[in-house]
Image: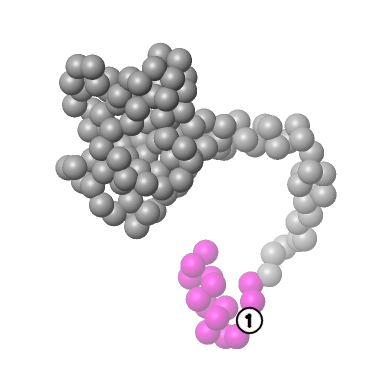
Amino acid sequence: MARLVVEHHHIGQMPLADSITTVPARNYYDPQRWLQEFDLIFRRLPLVVALTAEMRDAHAYKALDVAGMPVLLTRGADGSVRAFVNMCSHRGSILAEEGLGTARRFTCPYHVWTYNPQRRARRPVQELRFR
């Protein structure tokens, strides 16, 4: 395909399809189709949810909603980026409000459990874990 495009470029032409493809307008506004695509694409495939530049420094974090799931991305002191469900494992409270910031630990506002994003738990600090 790339060779064909390069050949057409050199002779000053555009490659044409054999036929015209049409997409029904309902594909863009049908709620059932949206739910099906959401489940098949956004909940099954890896998604790019942040850029390295957003969390350059150690202890930086980004909290956001991804396909209906609250996600907390953290950069540890070791430079590794990790992703967690942004909820306290006890009562489901959100640990960090949406946005960017810096924090060494995250504390549940409900009962003050503290989570260590480097996965080194110390009592009473709880590890962040995927559900």
Relative to 44, is 76 above or below? below
* Residue 102 pos. (x, y %): 32, 45
* Residue 20 pos. (x, y %): 77, 60
Give me the residue at 52% from left, 84% from top.
10
* Numbered-mark total: 1
- Left or right, 81 with respect to 30, comes to left
- Left or right, 34 with respect to 43, comes to right
The magenta-colored residue range is 1-15
Give me the residue at 39% from left, 17% from top.
111
* Residue 92 pos. (x, y %): 47, 19
- Left or right, 98 with respect to 102, comes to right
Residue identifier under label 1: 13
**Could you classify mark 1 by the number of other residues whose Cα lies within 10 Å: few (under 14), some (14-19), or many (20 or more)?**
few
Q: Secondary structure at mark 1?
A: loop
- Left or right, 107 with respect to 94, comes to left
Question: For the stretch drawn in magenta, what is the main secondary structure?
Answer: helix
Q: Is residue 85 visible?
A: no
Relative to 23, is 88 above or below? above
Residue found at the very far top of the displayed protein: 90
Residue in the foreground of this view, choosing between 91 and 38 = 91
